[in-house]
Image (tube, rainbow, N blue to C red):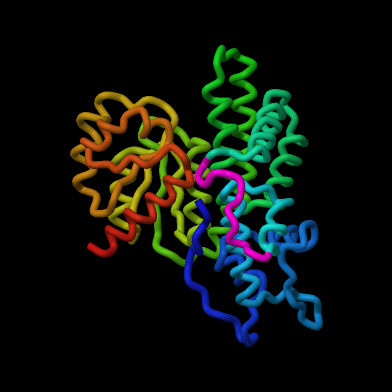
């Protein structure tokens, strides 16, 4: 799914032209990616100020959004320019819209998983940097990091060594996403969203990915480090003017929490309470009965669901 602008931005004083930071806010594409699309692939050609700063026209911004749409269809970056410059850019293209990975994504996933199993942090960095130079983070997370994380977590014939590789990958990914999360959060101007692990659980990579994706959409994410209790979460929601709360986890939830703790607690929370991660998938029916809203497993789909629920709650 193509990323949508995280928040409305005001045009700068330059007549009809936008600096790179504004274009990033409007399209969700990081400056590093925009520069790579220009230098390596010639997809956009911004103007320059006398001091060399890039300025983008509305036509450039429309073209950036076209690039996102084609990449989301599974079109390789090498083919995007040819399609955009073709006489009829609406010509049907190869690739199936949705979340089926293209050959490029499959290659990235295989390389990333192999690097994790070999405990090779340099290879992890190379694969991630290569993907981020072409695709926005809203695609890198659901198409690369999340599938690799899932493959390592669900690996058949789990051994202590594969468990160690999974822990190694999670540590690298959490550190990598945290730096990008801080950057995105510094520009977020939307409503406040509280994220926390389920009670009895610690922090999880699924929560990190969801936090970053929410921040790219302009949400001001207030992140509670686990473990936390239901009383702590209730006190937070009573104090903070948050639009919603997301609980996420990787492990099974206790029967007592599902049948006694959450049902009475959720009724005291005046904002939507959503559930994410493997925990939400395993206990979808029980969580719904307890008053929570389970989200899809795919982190980008979960982000889109989250936005819809927050808009609906605000309208009410």
Nearer to the camera, 227 or 21: 21
User: Residue 63: where, in percent of width, then height?
Assistant: 63, 67
Residue visible at 37% across and 36% down?
A: 198
- Coordinates of residue 186 in the picture (x, y in percent): 56, 62
Question: Is 261 placed above or below 90 here?
Answer: above
How many numbered callouts?
0
The residue lying toward the viewer, choosing from 175 and 128, is: 128
Asked if 164 appears above or below 269 in the picture, the reply is above
Magenta portion: prevailing SS class: loop
Q: Is residue 22 left or right of residue 198?
A: right
> Which of 10/183 is in front?
10
**Is 232 covered by the magenta stretch?**
no
The residue at 67%/58% (across/down) is 83
Tell me where residue 285 sits by quadrant: top left
Indicate the position of residue 133 as horizontal and vertical percent values.
Answer: 71, 52
Quadrant for residue 227, please give it.
top left
The image shows residue 125 at horizontal and vertical percentages of 73, 40
User: Does 200 sit left or right of 209 as displayed?
Assistant: left
Q: Nearer the viewer, residue 221 or 73?
A: 73
Locate the C terminus by quadrant: bottom left
Q: Quadrant of residue 196?
A: top left
Image position of 85 with respect to 115: above or below = below
Residue 88 drawn in magenta: yes
Q: Which residues are magenta?
A: 87-99
Could you tell whether 231 is left or right of 60 in the image? left
Residue at 45 percent across and 59 percent down: it is 219
């Amino acid at each position: 799914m193509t990323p949508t602008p995280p928040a409305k931005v005001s045009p700068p004083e330059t007549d009809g032209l936008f600096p790179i930071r504004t274009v990033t806010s409007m399209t969700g594409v990081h400056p590093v990616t925009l520069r790579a699309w220009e230098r390596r692939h010639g997809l956009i050609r911004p103007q320059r100020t006398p001091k060399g700063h890039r300025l983008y026209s509305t036509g450039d911004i429309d073209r950036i959004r076209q690039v996102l749409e084609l990449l989301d269809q599974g079109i390789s970056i090498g083919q995007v320019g040819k399609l955009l410059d073709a006489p009829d850019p609406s010509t049907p293209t190869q690739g199936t819209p949705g979340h089926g990975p293209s050959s490029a994504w499959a290659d990235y996933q295989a390389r990333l998983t192999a690097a994790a199993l070999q405990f090779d942090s340099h290879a992890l960095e190379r694969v991630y940097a290569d993907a981020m130079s072409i695709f926005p983070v809203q695609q890198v997370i659901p198409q690369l990091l999340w599938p690799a994380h899932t493959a390592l977590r669900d690996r058949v014939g789990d051994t202590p060594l594969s468990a160690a590789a999974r822990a190694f990958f999670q540590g690298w990914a959490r550190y990598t996403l945290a730096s990008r999360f801080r950057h995105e959060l510094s520009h977020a101007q939307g409503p406040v969203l509280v994220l926390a692990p389920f009670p009895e659980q610690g922090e999880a990579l699924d929560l990190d990915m969801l936090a970053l994706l929410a921040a790219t959409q302009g949400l001001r994410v207030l992140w509670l480090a686990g473990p936390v209790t239901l009383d702590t979460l209730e006190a937070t929601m009573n104090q903070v003017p948050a639009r919603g709360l997301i609980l996420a986890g990787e492990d099974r939830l206790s029967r007592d929490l599902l049948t006694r703790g959450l049902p009475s607690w959720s009724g005291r929370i005046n904002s939507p309470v959503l559930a994410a991660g493997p925990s939400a998938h395993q206990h979808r029916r029980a969580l719904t009965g307890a008053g929570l809203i389970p989200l899809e497993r795919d982190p980008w789909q979960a982000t889109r669901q989250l936005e819809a629920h927050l808009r609906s709650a605000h309208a009410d």
